[in-house]
Amino acid sequence: MKNKTNIYFIIGGLIGFFILWISESIIISIVSEEDFTSGMISKLYPSFQEKLEDIGVIGIGAICSQLKYRWLYLISFFYFLFRFQNSPDRNSIDNNSILWRIRMFYVVQLVFLPELLQELRVRGQWKALFQPLAQFSFIDTFPLEYYIQLTGILLFGATAILVLAKWKEKEIMPLLLTIFIFLTWTFLLSLFFGFGKIDHTYASLFAGIMGMVVCRISIFQNTDNATQGYRIFQAFIWSCYFFSGLEKISMSGFDWFQENHFEIICKFHATDLCVAISSNPISGSIIMLAGISFQLLSPLQWRFPKWGYVNVLGGLVFHLGTWLLFNIGGWQSPWIIMLIFLWPSSKPKNSEIIKLVKSTKNQG
Amino acid sequence: MVKQNWMIIILCLAFGSPFLAITDLFPLHRFGMFAQMPESNDQIETYQIELKIFGKNWVPLKTGNTYMDESYLPFLAKKNIKNPDSKKEFGKKIHLSLKEQPDSIKVTVSNGNKDNDFILFPL
């Protein structure tokens, strides 16, 4: 059975690779045509024109040639998750602990929601610059402030219910509220991103919100799935690191490891500490290597849940490092607080359970 | 534990589709950052929007939001000053967005050695 699955993945991977390889030249020839803007590309990919202006046809060709490799990365990742989806039971987390962690996740949302609403209020003044994302083109103008406030109040209420109310794993209401929360955050973030520039402040928080829907559906189906559901929620969080690492490697290749790379980034985000470190190229290279290694190794938490310790500590150093070195982000970033959900939990050890059972029997 | 492949498929779709479509999810890591990186400080350009209100001196535009001031508006300035039509449109939009409407708006592009001014409003 396992061999059969391996063969399916290999065949799927190769077919995708060759299809993308063959279509490379077709895509480049379409791009090279003068009047492509009225065609299908601009409808499917609205930022294409901008990208073409930035990097030209040759750059687009180079990006197209990446597609086949990206497909291979992706299918390998899929295989890794599929192959190691059931870790041994000794690594399972008890349901009560999971429910508390889920509650804590809703508390985190309550903490950051006012900040997002405040950001939207500022952007409201600049509504003339609003350009909806292609997927949300039905929102043609930036909504009036009180609509956003009303949405915020509803979202706050739904989240607060999930923090405070007594609910059990199998109830439908928490699941429906979780879906509502996901849709509402999607709406608010679509407004937030509708100003021509993607902002990553809430990326891992939103990934967690998405993962929570999957987690809750899984628990709703069967409470025995709680650990697996929670692991997928964690996977949504560490995937943010993994895919940004993969993107760095795909886009920059070995340039990432060049000696002067740290120095170049320092020029854009100069701080005293950064300038001091960049005077020694080896320290800079070590920092860049450590950063990308942490990101690319984060999926190990799927196979070895205890890798969560590395992810949490690595993530903390990563975010505090980018803040102190490049003045990007800050200690209060949602990314940092989201790391707590990657912290592995251990079930009470067998010896402790035996002690507990014995003491209960004695009392009886 | 029960195997739940659908969860893995959703995860792969959520992260894999933007990765495969090479969207702008990671704008700083776009080609320019590495392939056309400036070699010296002189080649790094900064964009600052400045206003003149009631005929007084030029003052930098401050929205009270760090992201808007340091990242978003300079990004838009860089994007829009190349093309005369979009420059005009951008100037109008800024003028429309400000409570205290300025007499003139300009973008100052500095590259270490010299400053270049691009008037956005009035045009």
Image (cartoon, helix red, strand yellow):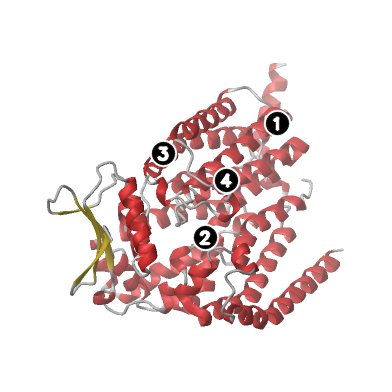
State which mark lies toward you, 4 or 1: 4
In 3D space, how far apart are the residues under numbered discs 4 and 1 (Cα atoms)? Answer: 18 Å
- Would you say residue A222 is visible in this rendering? no
Residue to which mark 4 is pinned: A208
- Would you say residue A232 is visible in this rendering? yes
Within 10 angstroms of label 3, few (less than 14), some, or many (20 or more) residues? few
Judge left or right: residue B17 versus residue A205: right
User: What amino acid is at disc 1?
Assistant: Glu
Secondary structure at numbered mark 1: loop
Residue to which mark 3 is pinned: A115
Q: Quadrant of the N terminus of chain A?
A: bottom right
Within 10 angstroms of label 2, few (less than 14), some, or many (20 or more) residues? some
State which mark lies toward you, 1 or 2: 2
Residue A270, percent from left and from top: 27, 64
Residue to which mark 1 is pinned: A169
Residue drawn where x is 59% and y is 80% of the image: A33
Q: Are marks 1 and 3 in contact (CB under 8 Å)?
A: no
Residue drawn where x is 46% and y is 64% of the image: B27
In 3D space, how far apart are the residues under numbered discs 3 and 2 (Cα atoms)? Answer: 22 Å
Sequence-first disc among 4 and 1: 1
Is A155 or A144 nearer to us in this picture?
A144
In 3D space, how far apart are the residues under numbered discs 2 and 4 (Cα atoms)? Answer: 17 Å
In 3D space, how far apart are the residues under numbered discs 4 and 3 (Cα atoms)? Answer: 17 Å
Q: Are tags 4 and 3 found on a single chain?
A: yes
Q: Quadrant of the C terminus of chain A?
A: top right
Residue A72, percent from left and from top: 67, 72
